[in-house]
Image (spheres, rainbow, N blue to C red):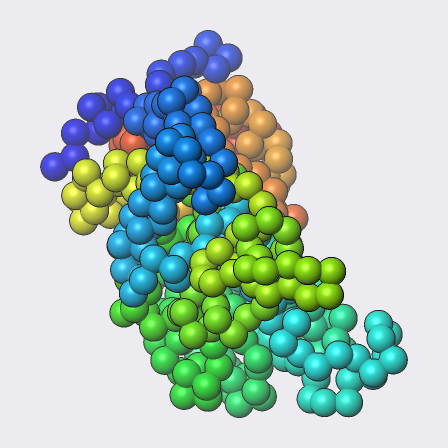
Amino acid sequence: MLNINEIRKQFPVLDQQVYGKPLVYLDNAATTQKPLCVIERERDYYLHENCNIHRGVHYLSQKATEAYEHARQTVADFIHAKEAKEIIFTRGTTESLNLLATSFEHLLPPLRGGQGGVNTDSQPIVLVTAMEHHSNLVPWQQMVQRHQGKLLVVPMDDHGVLDLEQYEKLLKEGPKVVSIAHISNVLGTINPVKEMVKMAHQYDIPVVIDGAQSIAHYSIDVQDLDCDFFVFSGHKMYAPMGIGGLYGKAEWLEKLPPYQFGGEMVDTVSFEKTTFNVLPYKFEAGTPNVGAALGLETAIQFMQSLDRKEVEEHENQLLQSAIEQLSEIDGIRFIGEAEQRSGLVSFIIKGVHPYDLGTLIDKMGVAVRTGHHCAEPVMTRFGIPGTVRASFALYNTLEEVEIFVKAVKKAAMMLR
């Protein structure tokens, strides 16, 4: 079994007090804490290897380039991509999704008469779900609005489960792309993405999977999922902030035009014409965050040093314990009660505003997230202003869950 006490020693940030109480950190869906090995790897890069990559013949540039490309191969192996060139380093999930939305838009026919004109061809359609994070909603929304298209939305039921019958009906309307969350950051719902990819492919529609909330909790095999794109953020999987990735099938990445322009992503440049670099470099303009990429690689190695099945069982035990204990509170309402769920619990308590509850819990040393969690349409769907969300990671303990629940009970009593 996992030795949680030994694991926690690798996360010094957890060993502190806030407001005179031991810190209980339950905001892991927003960002995870970083183990010492990740912090030290990034520091070591700046101490001994710092250099711009791909552009120099001298020792440091060659060393940094080799380390960076090794990190790319590590990411590819981690999610079972076919080739390393199918991995694009980005700042995270948000940039990856903006990259895709922008590149897909460039494949659309131009509007007649420019912006505000008329699209003489079929209007673009993008299909998302009712539980998307703003990062997997707004870029697609803006793209279709600029081209007078439509954003279709797969509905969900009161438990936070998608309606797959409606999904198939919407697929028949011919979207250019489907973009869906693997796990909802509000509801914890684990969507049946493999089945949804298979259904979309029957209509020759490419599928993007937002893996921001799944990659830290489950083993990902993009070839088994058969998704066309998979996006994720490093900071939600024990890696530094400002690094993440976009996986794309090579045939799709070859087809899509670049997202940004500048150095490194070019092949030849003249005043008359520019040709672009090969994969993956045509999507990586400018100087990358090399240190963070090496930190991401180290975070992956840290995760792989643990038994992933034991981590999954431990985190599920934390979730089930939290649900069981919170259920004893009068007036509690869970937001998201899918049978297949992971990683977090969201709730409100009758007569208590989530912000007030979260503020009092914080004073007791417990860090949770309150608000709409960058998913306002989800709040609208459930008719609430926001939720309190506790989200778990491999370093959390059952004792911390008990402290959290006691804090919720005490705060709710004070606010009623």
Instruction: Give left or right: position of 250 versus 302.
Output: right
| Residue 151 lies in quadrant | bottom right
53 and 350: which is toward the camera: 53
Instruction: Give left or right: position of 222 versus 187.
Output: left
Instruction: Give left or right: position of 161 versus 154.
Output: left
**Image coords of residue 227 (percent x, y):** 39, 70
**Image coords of residue 265 (percent x, y):** 55, 55
User: Is residue 84 at least partly visible in the picture?
Assistant: yes
| Residue 8 lies in quadrant | top left
Q: Residue furthest left?
A: 1
362 and 64: which is toward the camera: 64
- Vertical position of residue 390 compared to residue 172: above or below: above
> Residue at 16% across / 43% down in the picture?
307
> Residue at 39% across / 62% down in the picture?
86
User: Is residue 133 at least partly visible in the picture?
Assistant: no
**Image coords of residue 294 (percent x, y):** 37, 37
- Vertical position of residue 25 compared to residue 118: above or below: above
